Each structure stands twice: as C-alpha cells, then as structure tokens.
Image (spheres, helix red, strand yellow):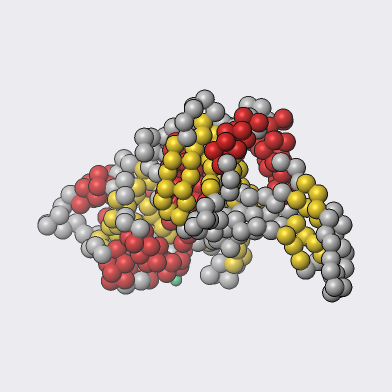
Amino acid sequence: MNIVFGITSGISIYKIPSVIRKLRKDGHNIRVLMTPNAKKLMNPIIFKVASGNEVYINDFSIHNPLLHIEIGDWSDVFVIAPLTANTLAKIANGIADNLLTTSFLACSGKKIVFPAMNVKMYDSQITQENIKKLKEYGVLVIEPDCGDLACGYSGKGRLPSEDKIIGIITRDIYEPLKGKRFIVTAGSTIEKIDPVRFITNFSSGKMGIEIAKYLYKKGADVLLIVGKTEVNIPEYITHIKVESTIDMLNAIKNNLKDYDGLYMVAAPVDFRVNNYSEEKIKRKGSLTIELIENPDILKSLRKDFKEKFFVGFALESKNGKQNASLKLKEKELDYIVLNIIEPDFNPMGNEENRIFLFEKSGSNALEFKGKKHKVAEWIVNKTLKLEEV
Ligand SMILES: Cc1cc2nc3c(=O)[nH]c(=O)nc-3n(C[C@H](O)[C@H](O)[C@H](O)COP(=O)(O)O)c2cc1C
C-alpha cells in the first residue's frame, strides 16, 4: 500500500517513527510530509531513516513543482498523525498554506486523520465543528484516546497506540466487509476445580485472533470473545475476556443480536466441575473430581438465532470428515472447519494449520494448509465469498 504520512507539530510526534518503521517492515511504501513547525519538534532525518524515503517540508522546489498534486495521486491512503488543532482547522476550511495542507486538499483518495491535543483544545466548540466538517467531507477522523496527557491534564486527546494506528491505516482501502458485523471466539475456556486449579485444553487462540484481525482488515466490525490465551490481542480489536464455557456462551448470547454472524473458533472445555471447592483442596492420597457436560455453544445458540451466519470449528482425532459433516447438519451451521490431530501434527498451539472446509450446500470438503494468518484469510475469503483465493 502507498501511504502518505503527514506529520504536524503535536507532542505525540515521538510515537510516529516507530509506526512508520513497522508499516515499512510490513511492506508498505511511505512518503512523509511535515509541517515546518513539526520540524522544530523532531528532526526530519529520523523520518527519512524510518521511511527510507525523502521527507518533504514546504518543498515547492523547481525540481518537483507539482509534488503537492503528484503525491496525493500516488497515495492509496493519506494519513495525518498527529494532527494538531491548527492543521485540523486549516484542512477543514480548505486552507492550503504549506506543502502538507496543499497536498491534503489536492488528494481525492482515502484520508485518515488522528487529532491529538490538550483536552480543552479538543473539547472546544471550534475544534468539534472542524471535526464535524471533516467527517462530512469524507475524511475518516479517528477519535483520540482518553488518559493522562503530556500537558499534565487528563481526558480525551491522546494519540492512540502504535498498534491501533497501524490497524486503522492498513485496513483494506475498499473495505469489502464495511457494514458487516461478526463475533469471533478464540482460545480455550477454563473450568475451576478450586481457587487455584482449573481444567483447560491446549488451544492457543492464534487461529481465532487471526480470523478477527482479517475480518477487521477487510472492514468488518468485530467483537472478539476470548477465553484463555497468551497471544497478543491488537488494541484495535474490541474484545471481551471470559473464563468458563458458560461465560463464553452468555457473552455471545448477550451480543449476537447486534451482529450478522459468528466464527466459533474457540475450543470451549466440554466438561465442568460439579463439586467446585471454595477452599484449596489439600493433598489426600487420591482425589475424584466429578465432571458434568457443558452446553454445546453452537447448538444452544442456533435455537434463538435461526437467521444468523454460523461458522463452526471442529477438532477431531478420529473419523474427522464423517464427524465434521455430521456436526455441520446437527448444529445447522453454514460452514464447518475441520482440524485433524494426526500422530505427527497437532494444530493446537501450532504456528501452522491444515484444515478442511465443509459448506452446508456443498458435498466436497476443500483443503488448505499454511501459516495460521494465511489459513485465516483463506477461511474468511471462502466463507464470505470475498474473492477467489
Ligand atoms: C512542545 C509543544 C507541544 C505541542 N503539542 C501539541 C499537540 O499535541 N496538539 C496540538 O494541537 N498542538 C500542539 N502544540 C501547538 C502546535 O505546535 C501549534 O499550534 C503549531 O502552530 C501547530 O503547527 P502545525 O499544525 O503547522 O504543525 C504544541 C506546541 C509545542 C511547543
């Protein structure tokens, strides 16, 4: 993706070299424009090194007099981060008095801005009206985060985290899933035995988190409901943490009415402890724990959510294909993804996966193998018929 990165003189400018470096590492092309005031806060050499390209500051030069037009045409997305109250006011009112503001006005493509400032500046009626105007002109204005500000105040005005900025910028420019809403579950659940012990399984959460990331990237609104996982959940993914299988079921039930469908990637524990001990169980030679069956999440949801789109996941160590086809019918799913445990391959916790996808109306399963992020892309593309992959 070609990204024009506009930088103004906000105190959070120090976060930007790292954002640019990571975007570049992910294969994006970055060209940086700075306001003359931004140059006073941070040396452009840092951005030149981070982006691997020239940095432009009021460069109305004889060598490239049409740079302000050319750079917007080159961009897939034009970003300004941080965006000061000053430059925000200018771009909302068509003022084009430096290379950054002129190029922004001349760019007709996708534009994303990240205002960041003192809370009083942000809350002022003038700034709010300028933000409203920018939104009406089709600019994506990302609300700043709340918290402690560099100026000593606390409130709304912080530049979002690097992770969140990168997530928002790298969303597919065409956002084919814009307006679509999905719940994704990930990880295992835990069933407590006593205050210090629990039963769980080896599910890492990687596959579900990759599916949530890809749905988001394609423009969908995503709610991740996640059990036990050590995997980093990007800040741009809205998520709810749950413990037990029943907690997971309730969290989905409470939210599903507002979503189009569910990718049930999590591996909820099938049994829970019948006689939970409030006190830590002492050593006593031997111990018998009585387990009772947990509800089957997909089966119990289908009764109340007949019209929703459901993708189930099955993990089998024997008769995988027969069992998956059976589950697809029994649970009235739209698709089921089968993972098979083989003597030399366990998908749980693995970086790679080999899956079979069964469609309710199709007879043959499709197979795909690869790194989990690639498998996630393939599953979403196939199940939502996004593109031929
Ligand atoms: C140290 C320092 C930090 C500043 N931080 C911010 C900020 O975070 N947000 C903001 O809107 N203005 C901030 N300002 C004020 C802007 O730099 C000032 O309004 C400037 O005229 C904006 O110019 P520009 O928009 O062309 O970069 C800061 C000023 C200084 C000296």
* Left or right side of 286 for 315: left
Q: Is residue 175 left or right of residue 157?
A: left
Q: Quadrant of ligand 1?
A: bottom left
Above or below — where is 102 with respect to 50?
Answer: above
Q: Determine whether 179 is above or below 171 in the image.
A: above
Q: Is residue 37 visible?
A: no
Q: What residue occupies the far left of the structure in this picture?
A: 63
Q: 369 or 10, which is in the foreground?
A: 369
User: x%, y% of residue 128?
Assistant: 53, 48
Q: Position of residue 115 (x, y in %)?
A: 47, 55
**Residue at 73% from the left image edge and 60% from the top image edge:** 199
Quadrant of image for the C terminus? top left
Q: Count of labels shown? A: 0
Is 235 displayed left or right of 113 in the figure?
A: right
> Where, by quadrant of the figure, is residue 24 drawn?
bottom left
Name the residue rendered at 36%, 35% in the picture: 388
Residue at the image position 37 percent from the left and 67 percent from the top: 17
Res 210 seen here: yes
Q: Nearer the viewer, residue 163 or 184?
A: 184
Q: Where, by quadrant of the figure, is residue 145 drawn?
A: bottom right
Comparing 20 with 176, the one in front is 176
Q: Going 68% across and 54% down the picture, which residue do you hit?
A: 189
Residue 332 in the image, given as x and y percentages of width and height: 63, 29
